[in-house]
Image: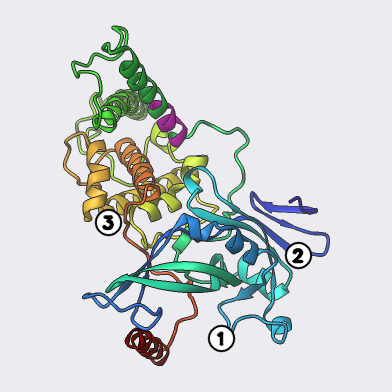
Amino acid sequence: MRFYTVQKLGPKRSLTPEGFLLCEEVPVARTGEMLYGPGEVPVEPGPDGLIRISRTPDEVFRPETLASCIGKPVTLDHPDDFVTPANFAALGKGAMLNLRRGSGIEDDLLIADLLVTDQAAIEAIQKDGIEEVSLGYEADYEQVSPGRGVQRNIVVNHVALVERGRCGPRCAIGDKEPQMAKKKPTFLDKLRALMKDAESEIEEEKKTGDEAPDDEDEDDDPPAKTGDAQSVLLKKILKRMDAQDAAIAALGQRRAKDSEKEKTDDEDEEDPEKKKTGDDGDLTEAETAGKLSQTEVDLYTGDAAASIPSRAEILAPGIKLPTLDAKMATGDRAAALCKCQRKALDVAYQTDAGKKAIGPFLGGLTADFEKLPAALVHAAFMGASELMKAQNNAGNSRSAAPTRDFGKARTVADINAANRKYWADRSAN
């Protein structure tokens, strides 16, 4: 679906001739596991007092669910009651259109375009930063065990603009950053290329039964057997990443030496009698963690930088990251994004799943993310988030972030009545 707009406000925001705000490619829901408190859904809480509800891709992307989203109203926060013809004039602030499943890193997301037609709602987005979204819907719940259930037959009523949604920053209106004039290959692009090359090598080894060609990286490992494919693939990827990290580190050292030499020359020109730099201004002192070399700054530009919030949510669901000022200098913004990666890695590493995903990228180094080089932090962050996403899509359980999405919960009386009817029918037979 194409829209007619007259003013571009950002990569995913624009205005129509009437002044309506068009927000394109907005994630409005995700698959996976959601966390609820007692009484929020008709499922018995677990021993920890919480309820974990699974929402599968088959349910989120079923034709009926997608159809139920089309044309449904945008609201400012969730209303007390569902939107109906009787209250639409007061609650409706726009419409949800063009529903589809995301692709690539976002293939677990339900994507929509929002046409916001109400001035207060437009100002809430543009001026107040109310950008996260949350669906309001009805659904059926099936209890699997105490504290665990499955959500089925989702029928959407509205999408709400909220300050904090249960899906977190992954379900929010698109960023305001200007588009890059020239798109550079992202780390994800490079990682995918490495994975594709390694997979091709493994498939070739399986077909021929021979070891890798002599001109490939030296590796004494035998050809991959059944069950070893992932291990071999990971080894090949890590070996290539090690080579890249070494090249980046060498480049960084050369830049640091050049910088030190320039600084020394400048000082000598100011003070001819000063012949060495090992005095009070010791140039061998390490840089603070907040400074990055130009090579490291380059890691945090383009699509790679834009994907950091969503990848942080994959690594550590529910993590709270600071909002970065769009007017920040490039170097300061890169340092801030690197700090966000360090925080996400540190939080994720405290879990078994996170440690399993991050560990292979550390190369045996201690998981002290505040001290690790920025290039290694970036590589570990991007690679581990990609692995965890692949595991999540394969059906593995994930840690869940609290969400504001809600269904129509049955009361205790409703549940008791259903149980009485069930046992009455059994006794009658």
Query: Which residue is denoted by mark 3 in the rendering?
Result: 347
Q: Earlier in the sequence, mark 1 or mark 3?
A: 1
Give amino acid for label 1.
Asp
Amino acid beneath label 3: Val
Badge nearest the viewer, 1 or 2: 1
Q: Name the image quarter holding residue 249.
A: top left
Task: Find residue 39 and report its horizontal and vertical position in percent.
Answer: 37, 83
In the image, taking residue 153 as reference, residue 67 lies left or right, namely: right
Residue that badge 1 annotates: 80
Name of the residue lying farthest toward the front: 429
Q: Please state the horizontal and vertical placement of residue 289, each as a whole percent of the image.
A: 29, 45
In primary-sequence order, the first of circles 2 and 3 is 2
Quarter of the rendering containing residue 52: bottom left
**Label 3 crowd (10 A; few <14 / some 14-19 / many >=20):** some
Q: Which residues are magenta?
A: 188-194
Name the kind of residue labelled 2 in the image: Phe
User: How far separated are the C-alphas under marks 1 and 3?
Assistant: 35 Å
Answer left or right for 79 relative to 267: right
Query: Is there any visible trace of residue 243 in the rendered image?
Result: yes
In this rendering, is residue 360 above or below 203? below
Quarter of the view holding residue 378: top left
Out of 139 and 313, give the one closest to the viewer. Answer: 139
Q: Is residue 356 left or right of residue 71?
A: left
Does dot 3 land on a helix, a strand or a loop?
A: helix
Which secondary structure, mark 1?
loop
Furthest residue toward right: 17
